[in-house]
Amino acid sequence: MAYAKRVLLASNGGDGGVSRGIATGLAKHGCRLVLLGDEGALAATAEEVRRFGGAGAAAVVGLDLEACDEAAAGAAVDRAWRCFDDGLDALVNCYSFQGEVQDCLSVTEDEYSKTIKANVMTPWFLIKAIAKRFRDAGSGGSIVCLTQIIGAERGLYPGAAAYGTSLGAVHQLVRLSAMELGKHKIRVNAVCRGLHLRDKFPVSVGEEKAERETGEVMPLRRWLDPEKDLASTVLYLVGDESRFMTGTTIFVDGAQSIVRPRMRSFM
C-alpha cells in the first residue's frame, strides 16, 4: 500500500538505527521525507531514503535540536514546509537526549536542564510550528512523538531520572496537544518504544550480560530491532487509517515494560 505522505522527521541519528529504520520504512511505502537535525549526521539516512524513493524522496534541513529556540525551530519548519509542493502532512519527532546512566543524586543542574530542553521544549517548539502551518493551510495533519518506556508509568529502570522525567512530560504534552489541536484537524499521538541493545541502560550493564539474561525474561525473548520494529506503527499513525486516533500512546516494546521489575532483578 502506498501512503504518499510528506513527512518532517526530526532526528540527529545516534539512536542505534531507530530513526533510520523509521525513515526507510516510510520511504518504502511511498512517503517523502524532510529530515530535520544535524545535516552531517542525517546525510546517510537521506541517501538511504532516496535509494527507496528516488532522488526527490528526501531533503535535509539543519537545526540544532539540543539548543534551538522557538524562532530557530519555526524558521527550520518553514524551510521544511517549502521543500515539497503543498507543504507537509506529518511531523515525526524521533529525537531525544538520553544523557548518562547515573544515580539520580549525581545528575547536575546543567545536565538536567539540557535534558528537559532537548526532550520537552524542542518537541513543543516543533509541534507548535508545524501545527500553525497545518491550521493556516486548513489541511490538518498528524504529529507523532517517539518516546521510550522509561517515560511511562511502567517500564522504569535505574540511572535515568532526568531522561525518564522528560519523556513523561512528552506523554502529557501529546495528550494535551491532542485535546487542543483537534479542532484544526490535527492529530497527536505517541509511540513508546522498548529498549534495544545499543541503548544506554543495556550498555551500562554490559551487552553480553544483557543479551544473555534478558533472553530468559522478556516475553518475546529478544530486544527491540530498531530498524524493523517501529516503522509500521509510525506509518499507521501518519496515514489516514488512524484518522480517529489522537491523544494515544502505542507501546511497541515486546512487553518489556510489563516485566521490567523482574528484568531489573536479573540485571
Image: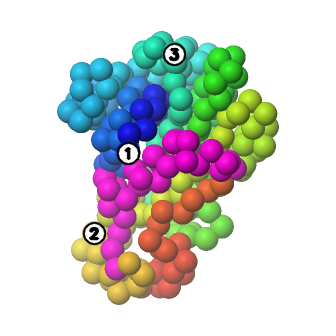
x and y, in percent, of residue 192 in the image? 53, 57
Residue 102, compared with residue 265, is above or below; it is above
Q: Mark 1 or mark 3: name the one nearer the start of the chain.
A: 1
x and y, in percent, of residue 198 in the image? 32, 58
Residue 228 or residue 259, whichever sits in front: 228
237 within the magenta span:
yes
Q: Quadrant of residue 27?
A: top left
x and y, in percent, of residue 154 in the image? 61, 71
Question: Residue at 43% across / 17% down in the picture?
Answer: 84
131 within the magenta span:
no
216 left or right of 188 in image: left
> Marks 1 and 3: which is nearer the front?
1
Residue 101, compared with residue 14, is above or below; it is below
Q: Quadrant of the C terminus?
A: bottom left
**Picture disc at residue 207:** 2
244 left or right of 255 in image: right
Residue 66 or residue 2, whichever sits in front: 2
Residue 139, compared with residue 109, is above or below; it is above
Amino acid on which disc 3 is placed:
Asp
Q: Mark 3 or mark 2: name the one nearer the start of the chain.
A: 3
Amino acid on which disc 2 is placed:
Glu
- The magenta segment: 221-247
The answer to whether residue 160 shows anywhere in this view is no
Which residue is denoted by mark 3 in the rendering? 86
**Picture disc at residue 1:** 1
